[in-house]
Image (tube, helix red, strand yellow):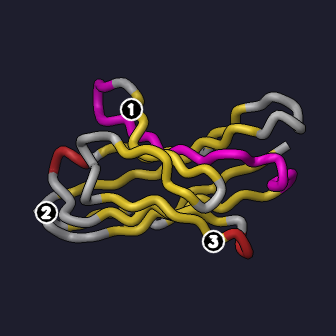
Amino acid sequence: QVTLVESGGGLVQPGGSLRLSCTASGDTICIERINWYRQGPGQERDLLATILGDDPAYYADSVKDRFTISRNSAENTWYLQMSSLKPEDTAVYYCNALTRSSCPNEIYWGQGIQVTVSS
């Protein structure tokens, strides 16, 4: 079992930066990849970025060159560094963990955290 907790959200002005954290506890050795998603009002949940181990593997076009996914393995924490934020980045952001093949096949979600970009 893995528990994910997001932090670092809040209100930021357009053009500003914010760093989201996703801290895992429990069977963290089973985590193969972490994804960051977001869901805006009335919208579907969209995949933004993926990291495998320490290597970023995917960025959505909408966030490429503005967002960076990374990992602090010693603290079981993954980050989404967001810069040049736009009002359309306003959403609830979620981290999601997929397990490696040597562990039970599970998908875990954090509770989500609000990011609001507004002047």
The kind of residue tagged 3 is: Asn
Q: Position of residue 77 (x, y in %)?
A: 64, 65
Q: Position of residue 50 (x, y in %)?
A: 50, 46
In this image, 108 relative to 41: left or right?
right
Look at the numbered disc 1 and give the secondary structure of its residue: strand
Q: Position of residue 106 (x, y in %)?
A: 77, 31
Q: Of callouts 2 and 1, which one flags the residue occurring earlier in the amino acid sequence?
A: 2
- Identify the residue under disc 1: 46
Give the residue drawn at x 10%, y 63%: 119
Local packing at callout 1 (Cα closer than 10 Å; few below 14, some 14-19, many 20+) is: some
Marks 2 and 1 sit apart, C-alpha to C-alpha, by 21 Å
Q: Nearer the viewer, mark 1 or mark 3?
A: 3
Q: Amino acid at mark 2?
A: Pro
Circle 2 residue: 14
Q: Which mark is residue 3?
A: none
Q: Secondary structure at mark 2?
A: loop
Q: Which residues are magenta?
A: 26-43
Q: Earlier in the sequence, mark 3 or mark 2?
A: 2
Which residue lies at the image location 49% right of the left edge and 54% below the top edge? Answer: 56
Q: Is residue 36 magenta?
A: yes
Pointer 3: what residue?
Answer: 72
Residue type at numbered disc 1: Asp
Residue 36, above or below 25: above
